[in-house]
Amino acid sequence: MKFAIIAAGEGSRLMQEGISVPKPLVRVGGEALLDRLVRIFLSEGATEIDVIVNALYPELQAHLQQLLSRGLPLRYVVRTTPSSMHSMYELSSLLASEPFVLTTVDTIFRESEFHAYVQEWQRLSASGAADGLMGVTDYIDDEKPLYVRTGAQQQVTAFLDADDHPHYISGGIYGLHPRSLQTLRRCVERGESRMRNFQRALLADGLHLRAWPFTKVLDIDHATDITKAEQFLLS
């Protein structure tokens, strides 16, 4: 199975708060965010890890070259994009051959839970029982969460900007079949620019998505999130 990392954001909020390194190289528990995901994906048997970074930080490209020099199954794209959805589109040609798991570089989760998630996505994708397995959580610590409504057997029925009775929000962890990339292409052609609109389009196109609950998923958007993530991983 392939894995992919969107690491093309500018990290402007972190820099405004005094963090001088690009977000993918921010350290949580002594490990760069990018390196943490690469390590975890390799432990899950990744056949390939595809990464997109922007053109603003040559030090990040140098870091990726160092990883490549170690013989890792890594490919990367350098492109400055307007959104995460466009970043995924730039990676899409690398992801078209087999089911994959994609996440943003600052997504923090428990490794044991991620292992169980990957096992379930491998089972679902191999059997054809689902077109996607979306990582969700009932822990809400996001400025603009995307709510996820589910039905029987955790089938995703809606993605919502607001919900009077929220249960889950998106964790930014996406297990998807390559057929989802057709929807992605149409979203780009229509001028869509947000990952949440892509997820809604997947349902509109009739793809069968299931939700897989994580206890917590954190993002590193502010300097204070680093300490919060370290405490979470130690708990």
Image: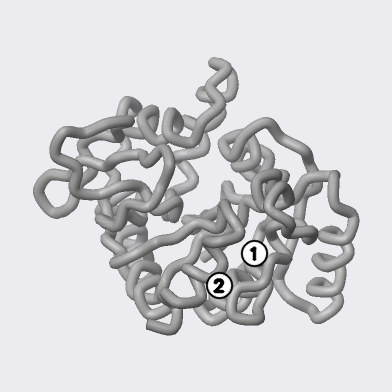
Give the quarter of the figure containing the C terminus.
bottom left
Q: Is residue 164 above or below residue 5?
A: above
- Label 1 sits on a secondary structure element that is strand
- At horizontal 29% and vertical 50% (from top left) the residue drawn is 130
Callout 1: few (<14), some (14-19), or many (20+) C-alpha neighbours within 10 Å? many
Are the residues tagged 2 and 1 within 8 Å (C-beta)? yes
Q: Is residue 146 left or right of residue 31?
A: left
Instruction: Kindly indicate the quadrant of the structure image that contains residue 205.
Output: top left
Q: CA distance from mark 2 to mark 1?
A: 8 Å
Any mark on residue 49, and which? 1
Name the amino acid, label 1.
Ile
Amino acid type for the residue under numbered disc 2? Phe
Up-down relation of residue 6 to residue 66 (above or below): above
Q: Would residue 8 be visible to someone looking at this image?
A: no
* Closest to the observer, 97 or 110: 110
Q: Which residue matches tag 2?
A: 41
Q: Which residue occupies the foreground of this view, 124 or 86?
A: 86
Q: Residue at x 39, y 53 (%)?
A: 171
Q: Residue at x 54, y 16 (%)?
A: 190
Return the residue found at the far left: 152
Asked if residue 235 lies left or right of residue 5, the reply is left
Left or right for 129, reference 113:
left
- Decide: is 45 above or below 62: below
Place of residue 9 in the rendered image (x, y in percent of width and height, measured from the top left): 68, 45
